[in-house]
Image: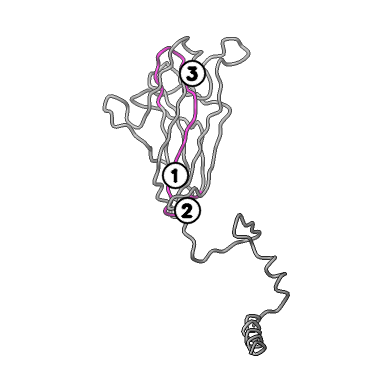
Amino acid sequence: MSRSRDLADTGVKANYLDNVASDINTQLTGKAPLASPTFTGTTNISSGVTLPSSMIKQVLTAVDTDGTACSAGDHSSPSFVDCVTLSFTPSSGTKCIIFVDAIVGTSLDNSPAMLRVLRDSTVLDTSTITSAPAHTTQVCSSGSHSNVTVPHNRIIYDTHGANGSTAIEYKFQLARITSGTDTVVGRTYSDPSGITYRSTQATRITVLEVT
């Protein structure tokens, strides 16, 4: 009776070996572990995986280290100049979070500057305050006239609307409000020592493309 049972068990176990073409232990050793697996090459996931609803697809940064000056125009007819630009082709249906980091100075004490961010020709994050120039942000430098800068930072959430094959360009721009009062980004207006500006900083625009 015991021998018959052993034979039956052996037959069942032997059926487990159907389609085995090589050493079983070698095959098991080659499997990825359940905890912290490491894969090489291209890994395709067809189903059974739940991804977060929001993901960062890519991060891009453009930097200007030369500084930008504007010495033309006024609030009624501004002459915007590019401080830093970033071009890329986003995927269809994604959004972009834009970060701007800069310092701003002027040639006179307590003088405002106009600053704006655009996607191609569309001005983003516009002001609805009627007393301020539309599509601008005003920054006043105070203190020792042209030797002072103030920080300027922006965070903008943008629905770009691109179709996945068309490039877009984000721009950070500068203009002056008052004729005769020049504005600068990335440094103080003047160089009082003849050696170095009192304040300098690279101007940066960073874009996170998110789903």
Say what amino acid the circle numbered 1 marks. Answer: Cys
Horizontal side of 178 relative to 150 (left or right) equals left
Could you tell me which residue is drawn at 56 percent across and 21 percent down?
200
Helix, strand or loop at disc 2? loop
**146 relative position to 193: left or right:** left
Magenta-highlighted residues: 89-114
Q: Residue lying farthest left?
A: 130
- Residue for point 53% across, 21% down: 187
* Residue 13 picture quarter: bottom right
Point out which mark residue 155 bears.
Answer: none
Q: Image point 36% across, 36% down: which residue?
A: 125
For badge 2, the amino acid type reads: Ser
Whichever of callouts 3 and 1 sits on the residue coming sooner in the sequence is 1
192 on left or right of 141: right
Crowding near the residue tagged with mark 1, few <14, some 14–19, many ≥20 C-alpha atoms within 10 Å: many
Image point (64%, 59%), residue name: 39
* Left or right placement of residue 128 versus residue 162 in this view: left
Asked if residue 28 lies in the magenta stretch, the reply is no
Residue 103 x, y percent position in the rendering:
49, 24
Residue 77 in the image: state x and y as whole percent.
36, 27
Outermost residue on the front side: it is: 1
First-in-chain label (3 vs 2): 2
Query: Can you say whether 157 is above or below 176 in the image?
Result: below
Instruction: Say whether marks 3 and 2 touch (CB < 8 Å).
Output: no
State the residue position of label 2.
91
From the viewer's side, name the closer residue of 204 and 118: 204
Q: Are marks 3 and 1 in contact (CB under 8 Å)?
A: no
Residue at mark 1: 96
- Give the number of the disc on residue 149: 3
Query: Circle 3 sits in a helix, a strand or a loop, which is it?
Result: strand
